Amino acid sequence: MNENFPVISQAEQFYYKGGKTGILISHGFMGTPQSMRFIGEKLADYGYSVFAPRLEGHGTHYLDLEQRTSDDWLESLEAGYLVLRKHCTTIFVLGQSMGGTLALWLARKHRNLAGVVLVNPALEIPSYEWLRGKMEPRYLDEGEPDIKARDVHEITYSKTPIKAIQTLQGLMDKTPEILREINCPVLGFKSIEDHLVPADNTDYILEHIDSDIKQCIALKNSYHVASMDHDKDLIVSECHKFVQQQIGVKKVPNA
């Protein structure tokens, strides 16, 4: 099946072209760049060039997602990296949930990345475990996004394909094997109360990643989709601080 699905309004990729320091942003499984727009806009206000690609199969229709592989998702993120490379001399990658998992794979491949920022990165999703090896039901009804803040709307699908979940599980299963191959600086955020991805996923990554510079910050007032939750300003400010520390400049007018 090869169908062309239109992109949902406001789920499109976004690019804020600023200075020579770039920040590549990846949304998570079932999400879209819309979930990362606040983070992206605020980082762009500091003068960074910010690009958030839409991962293949996301922001269109769940039938589209069902057809995609984890290689498709990683290629979408890498395409965004190549966009920033045309303008930026220094690039960081920030990923939330599955986006954090993909960010690790990108860092493994592109060792010139200046740093990785992880927001509730996913190595396991306990609520999906019962689906391993199953073929039915083909789709699951999707519940409300895991966000503590009220009156927040995240663009997502009404149904989740089991095939896509199993694709995600395959990606998460093999990610621990590559952590020792990643040595760039890493900043991790973990929501203390996360109903989808256990907070110790972030702890495990930081413990096993082969980097001399790694830091973990607890988010005490957000659930899983922290980029849209109460701690989103904290994520922005700490990300900015981390980037500035790595490029070795306290104040950069043109970032």
Image: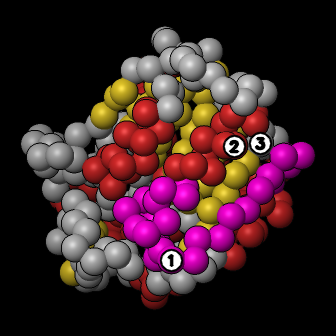
Q: Which residue is mark 1?
A: 221
Question: Could you classify mark 1 by the number of other residues whose Cα lies within 10 Å: few (under 14), some (14-19), or many (20 or more)?
Answer: some
Residue type (three-letter) at the residue carrying disc 1 = Asn
> Are the residues flagged by discs 2 and 3 in contact, CB closer than 8 Å?
yes
Residue type (three-letter) at the residue carrying disc 3 = Pro
Viewer-nearest residue: 91 or 183: 91
Picture layout, residue 16 above or below residue 68:
above
- Picture coordinates of residue 127, whole percent (x, y): 46, 85
Viewer-nearest residue: 176 or 2: 176
Which residue lies at the image location 60% right of the left edge and 27% below the top edge?
91
Q: Earlier in the sequence, mark 3 or mark 1?
A: 3
Q: Which residues are magenta?
A: 209-235
Q: Secondary structure at mark 2?
A: helix
Spatial distance from mark 3 to mark 1, Cα to Cα? 25 Å
Q: Which residue is mark 3?
A: 185
Query: Which numbered marker is on residue 64?
Result: none
Q: Residue furthest top?
A: 86
Q: Which residue is mark 2?
A: 242
Q: Is residue 216 magenta?
A: yes
Question: Could you classify mark 3 by the number of other residues whose Cα lies within 10 Å: few (under 14), some (14-19), or many (20 or more)?
Answer: many
Q: Secondary structure at mark 3?
A: loop
Which residue lies at the image location 29% right of the left edge and 37% below the top edge?
13
Instruction: Say which quarter of the image contains residue 55.
Output: top left
Q: Is residue 224 magenta?
A: yes
Residue type (three-letter) at the residue carrying disc 2 = Phe
Viewer-nearest residue: 59 or 39: 39
Q: Is residue 228 visible?
A: yes
Q: Earlier in the sequence, mark 2 or mark 1?
A: 1
Q: Is residue 68 visible?
A: no
> Are the residues flagged by discs 3 and 1 in contact, CB closer than 8 Å?
no
Which residue lies at the image location 75% right of the left edge and 33% below the top edge?
246
